[in-house]
Image (cartoon, helix red, strand yellow):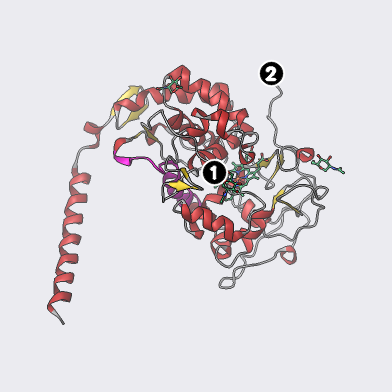
Amino acid sequence: MTSLSLMVIAALFLRLVMTDSHSSVALAAPNSRLKYTCTPGRVVKHQECCKWFEILDDMQENLFENECGPEAHESLRAMFHDAIGYSRTGMFNGTYAGGGADGSIMFHAEVELAYKANVGLDEIIYPQRNVALKHDVSFGDIIHFAGAVGLTNCGGGPRLQFFAGRPNTSEPAPDYMVPAPFHTADQIFERMADAGFQPDEVVQLMTAHTVAAQHSINPGFNSAPLDSTPQDFDGQFFVETLLRGTEPAGNGTEQGEASSPLPGEFRLQSDVLLARDPRSACEWQSMINHHEVMIAKFERVMTKLTTLGQDRGALIDCSDVIPGSSRLNHEAMLPAGKTMKDIEPACALIPFPSLSTVSGPVKSLAPVRHKYAHH
Ligand code: HEM
Ligand SMILES: *[C@@H]1O[C@H](CO)[C@@H](O)[C@H](O)[C@H]1NC(C)=O
Ligand SMILES: *[C@@H]1O[C@H](CO)[C@@H](O)[C@H](O)[C@H]1NC(C)=O
Ligand SMILES: *[C@@H]1O[C@H](CO)[C@@H](O)[C@H](O)[C@H]1NC(C)=O
């Protein structure tokens, strides 16, 4: 063995010992000393986080009405469209693009909401903006807080981390940074890699489409969900995108619409491609029957997304303000009327998991609207 390799081994050993002693110090510290009680039952590590409980209550009551409805879905989409305006090179198409999760989609709403990819986001960005102004918090913080809060209303929803303290000012993100549903897998992977995401992480982010509907690609098919359970953060999206398309797709004028497998369901062409591409198909399929892993991976990749372009050291961890979600009481299933023969498996390494079929008649999926009629 050379002396160099001995040195390397010694250095690795030292690191192991040091990391270990470091973590045992953190564990030994009494937790109670590190916590603040904002109001009874509402405890945080950092006192500065207390004001977010007021914003939580305000949003749940007045914006989301405690539902995993259209506002919760749009708030999740807004997180992505704000944050993905980021390139690791700091530039995109000759323009500054280093802001990331900075609230620029709200600060420069008149610029960014005019981009084709952002059609419809005005419906959530302006109401969120009012909440930010009312509570005097930054536009970046409110977008990435709202998305996390909305998701807690979804069955089986994740508990995203939330960091507060993004600066309020930003530059507008340039156009063409948000992937489009008519892009090829190559185009999507290239854009996402430019922002720092590998194909597996792109799949993990796509879990968001399990609580989603479309409004703008085919306006004649407004509020059509992307899976059969748009109020649940489950694996159905990953199953249903692998079903053979059978329904006619619009009238052919819609860029990015694909033939869907279920009446009332909308299918994006980009989801069809990502579900079947050799670079992403196995990660996609793995999401179907590993709910806890799917959630853990989504939480991790969303922390990365929502802090893109931000100085993590300057942010305060207010994750303890985000409540837990209700648990899911169902496994991934084949929708009524479908059998394993309708699946188009795309992962060459692992067989498609065997799923049972939802019993009962085939029904057209309902559009995603509010549970209660109001306003
Ligand atoms: C990478 C490729 C992606 C493409 C091409 C894409 C495309 C789309 C399109 C076209 C819609 C329909 C919008 C409308 O007509 O209203 C949509 C909806 C949605 N997207 Fe994506 N998306 C992508 C990734 C993501 C990611 C990473 C997230 C979040 C982490 C996300 C979250 C959502 C949500 C929550 C909706 C539903 C919005 C609603 O119900 O109003 N998407 N997406
Ligand atoms: C953020 O910027 C907007 C627009 O200039 C301003 O109205 C708002 O008060 C600012 N908020 C904070 C927390 O600085
Ligand atoms: C760069 O911007 C121009 C318009 O300014 C646009 O036509 C072109 O498609 C953009 N290129 C990319 C790679 O997005
Ligand atoms: C096709 O659909 C688009 C979008 O929904 C609509 O604007 C257009 O009028 C439709 N065209 C025909 C021929 O029905």
Q: What mark, if any, has residue 375 been given in the picture? A: 2
Q: What mark, if any, has residue 322 been given in the picture? A: none
- The image quadrant where one finds the N terminus is bottom left
Cβ atoms at labels 1 and 2 below 8 Å apart:
no
Q: Please name the predominant secondary structure of the magenta segment in the image.
A: helix
Could you say whether the residue bearing mark 1 is in a helix, strand or loop? loop
Is residue 5 depicted above or below 274 in this figure?
below
Of residues 196 and 231, the one nearer the viewer is 196
Of residues 47 and 115, the one nearer the viewer is 115
- Residue at 27%, 31% (x, y): give it: 35
Does residue 290 appear in this view? no
- Return the residue at label 1: 156
Residue 30 lies, in percent from the top left, at: 20, 37
Is residue 245 depicted above or below 101 in this figure?
below
Report the span colored magenta. Answer: 294-313
Query: Does ligand 1 reach within 8 Å of label 2's beta carbon?
Result: no
Q: Is residue 310 magenta?
A: yes
- The image quadrant where one finds the C terminus is top right
Residue 93 lies, in percent from the top left, at: 51, 48
Residue 31 in the figure: left or right of residue 248: left
Q: Counting residues from the N terminus, which is met first, the one under dot 1 or under dot 2?
A: 1
Quadrant of the picture in which ligand 2 is shown: top left
